[in-house]
Image: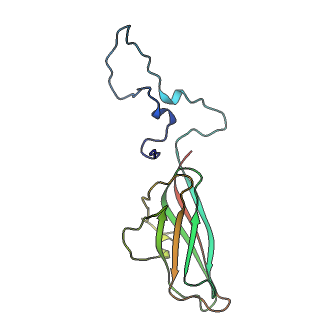
Amino acid sequence: MPNYFNDLADVGDDLEIGWNPFKRRRKRGARGATRQIPARRLLPQIPGVPARGLGEQPLGFGATAFTAGSGTLLTLTASPQRPFRGRRLVIDLTRTGASATGLVTLTRIDVGVDNQLPGSGALAVSTFANNAVGVNLDMDPCTPGVNIVLQFNISAAPAMADRVDLAAALIGEVVR
């Protein structure tokens, strides 16, 4: 699997051109003369099309709700369509009704089949609130077709028509 995130994802870098502005090269005679062309000059600049490279974009997971009939375990899934590496998770939580008081925790963050949490302990979703500070993640990169799954648990399900709504987004690096 190519590593899109360590080499700035410049398509020309994978070509056997051998151009490196910081590497000293010895001069060759007429027999072995080669012209060094920067890889980025092989890709034409098209007006209105962003240059290839890394960018920062959000990946939405949608929304779900803990209700009287939902149980105490819910998941949200996202499928990035470009190579993606998550950096900042934002979770929004809204409670409706008097019985919607259970503690909501994040129990797993999976990229493919790999759990991204270093331990087995659950994290309160307030850790990833929109105004939280210092909660950057260094998640594994994923390619298109690999799902990112968030698993949530609530300590006590709401009763009757009460509910706890969840929405999540993951902001990260994407290869354009």
Q: Position of residue 121 (x, y in %)?
A: 39, 76
Closer-to-camera residue (87/66)? 66
Q: How many marks?
A: 0
**Residue 144 vs residue 161: left or right?**
left
Q: Is residue 160 left or right of residue 124?
A: right
Residue found 48% across the figure and 65% down from its top:
110
Q: Position of residue 143 (x, y in %)?
A: 52, 52
Q: Residue at x 47, y 67 (%)?
A: 109
Between 51 and 148, the one lying in front of the other is 148
Q: Quick check: 65 above or below 169?
A: below
Q: What colour scheme governs how the chains and residues are painted in the rendered image of this protein?
A: rainbow
x and y percent of residue 130 in the render? Answer: 53, 68
Q: Which one is nearer the viewer's eye here, 120 or 100?
A: 120
Q: Residue furthest top?
A: 30
Query: Quarter of the image holding residue 51?
Result: top right
Could you say where residue 55 lies in the image, as x and y percent from the top left?
53, 48
Placement of 148 over or under 143, stated as above or below? below
Image quadrant for the C terminus? top right
Tell me which corner region of the image, top left, top right, bottom left or bottom right, holds residue 74: bottom right
Residue positioned 63% across, 71% down in the render: 63
Please name the residue shown 62% across and 78% down the image.
Answer: 65
Residue 61, placed above or below residue 57:
below
